[in-house]
């Protein structure tokens, strides 16, 4: 996470609201040895999707995300081209949709890594 991109304190409002915890996987910044560099405020509706209607820098459109979830989410748009969230309930609904996308990609990635690890194990 680039430290020159704190969006004027907006990211901190997001971290505090989310209790310093990834909204997607539940990883805690504090429990993770205060590795603040591994967390970011992620745009639920992506900032730079292919369409012109990018997600805004608002507390409602930003959620705390660990670097893994942030990378796996990529430019996935849980609004499917719709408007960014304006309520906590809508935000949570979109987090769940995004988390389904993230979890599917993570499960495949982890399975691939385990297979690679086993193929390179000593004696194989
Ligand atoms: Zn996460």
Image (cartoon, grey):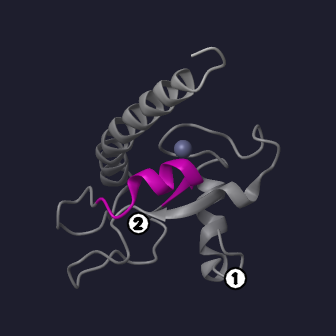
Q: Is residue 48 left or right of residue 39?
A: left
Quarter holding residue 43: bottom left
Magenta-colored stretch includes residue 72: yes
- Helix, strand or loop at disc 1? loop
Within 10 Å of disc 2 (Cα), the crowding (few <14, some 14-19, many 20+) is many
Magenta stretch bounds: 63-76
Q: Is residue 118 above or below residue 72?
A: above
Q: Quadrant of the N terminus?
A: bottom right
Residue 8 position, x and y percent, is: 65, 83
Q: Residue at x 34, y 64 (%)?
A: 75
Q: Position of residue 105 (x, y in %)?
A: 36, 41
Image quarter for ligand 1 equals: top right
Q: What percent of the width, then of the height, locates residue 74?
A: 39, 60
Q: Earlier in the sequence, mark 2 or mark 1?
A: 1
Query: Label 2, on which residue?
Result: 61
The residue tagged with tag 2: helix, strand or loop? loop
The tally of labels here is 2
Residue at (69% x, 82% y) in the render: 4
Please determine whether, in this image, residue 56 is positioned above or below residue 27.
Answer: below
User: Which is nearer the eye, 115 or 107?
Assistant: 115
Q: Which residue is mark 1?
A: 4
Does the magenta portion include 93? no
Where is 21 relative to 63, above or below? above
């Amino acid at each position: 996470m680039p430290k020159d991109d704190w969006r004027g304190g907006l990211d901190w409002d997001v971290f505090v609201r989310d209790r310093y915890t990834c909204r997607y996987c539940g990883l805690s910044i504090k429990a993770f040895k205060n590795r603040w560099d591994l967390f970011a405020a992620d745009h639920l509706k992506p900032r730079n999707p292919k369409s012109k209607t990018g997600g805004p820098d608002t507390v409602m459109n930003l959620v705390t995300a660990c670097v893994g979830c942030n990378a796996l989410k990529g430019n996935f748009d849980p609004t499917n081209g719709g408007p960014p969230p304006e309520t906590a309930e809508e935000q949570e609904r979109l987090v769940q949709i995004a988390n389904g996308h993230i979890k599917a990609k993570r499960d495949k990635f982890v399975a691939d890594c385990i297979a690679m690890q086993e193929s390179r194990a000593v004696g194989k």
